[in-house]
Image: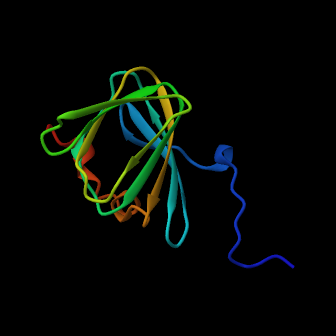
Amino acid sequence: MPHDSVRHVRWDDLPREKVTDSLSRKLVTGERMMLAQVFLDEGCIVPKHSHENEQLTYILSGALRFWIGEDESEVIDVRAGEVLHIPSHVPHKALALEDTLDVDVFSPPRADWLDGTDSYFHDDG
C-alpha cells in the first residue's frame, strides 16, 4: 500500500522556470529539503549572495567557477562529476565556464525560490 506522502517525479515532466536569459531551473521540494536542476549558459553569472540554506552543488555537465567569502578570496572550479558543499550563510558567487547542468540540494528548501523573492539574480553586484 503506497504512502500518501511518497512522490515519484520525472524531470522531463516538470516545467523549466526561466529565471534570467541565461539561467533556468526545475524544482522538486520536500518538507525539509529541495532538489533543483539548474541550467546555466556559458558566461552566466550568479551574483554574490548567501542564504540560511545549506547547499550541495553537483555538476552533471559543464563547469562552474565559484568565488567564496565576503571578499571572494577563495576561487574553486567545480567540474562534471564534482560536488561543492556550501555551509549556511557563506557568501558565494558563480560563473558558468561553459554550458552547465548542475543539481543543487538545499536544506531547508529555498523559500525565496518558491515565492519569487530571489532578486539577487537581477542585482548588478
Q: How many marks?
A: 0
- Specify how the rendered protein is coloured: rainbow
| Viewer-proximal residue among 99 and 89 | 89
Where in the figure is residue 12, as x and y percent of width and height?
Answer: 67, 43
Write the residue at 61% across / 50% down.
14
Rendered position, 111 above or below 44: below
Left/right placement of residue 7 relative to residue 80 reads right
Write the residue at 44% across / 58% down.
106
Rendered position, 1 above or below 114: below
Q: Quadrant of the C terminus?
A: top left
Write the residue at 34% across / 55% down.
87
Where in the figure is residue 82, as x and y percent of width and height?
Answer: 51, 34
Where in the figure is residue 86, as x and y percent of width and height?
Answer: 36, 50
- Pick out the residue farthest to the right: 1
| Viewer-proximal residue among 33 and 79 | 79
Rendered position, 42 above or below 111: above
Left/right placement of residue 7 relative to residue 24 reads right
Q: Quadrant of residue 124?
A: top left
Where in the figure is residue 13, as x and y percent of width and height?
Answer: 67, 48
Q: Quadrant of the N terminus?
A: bottom right
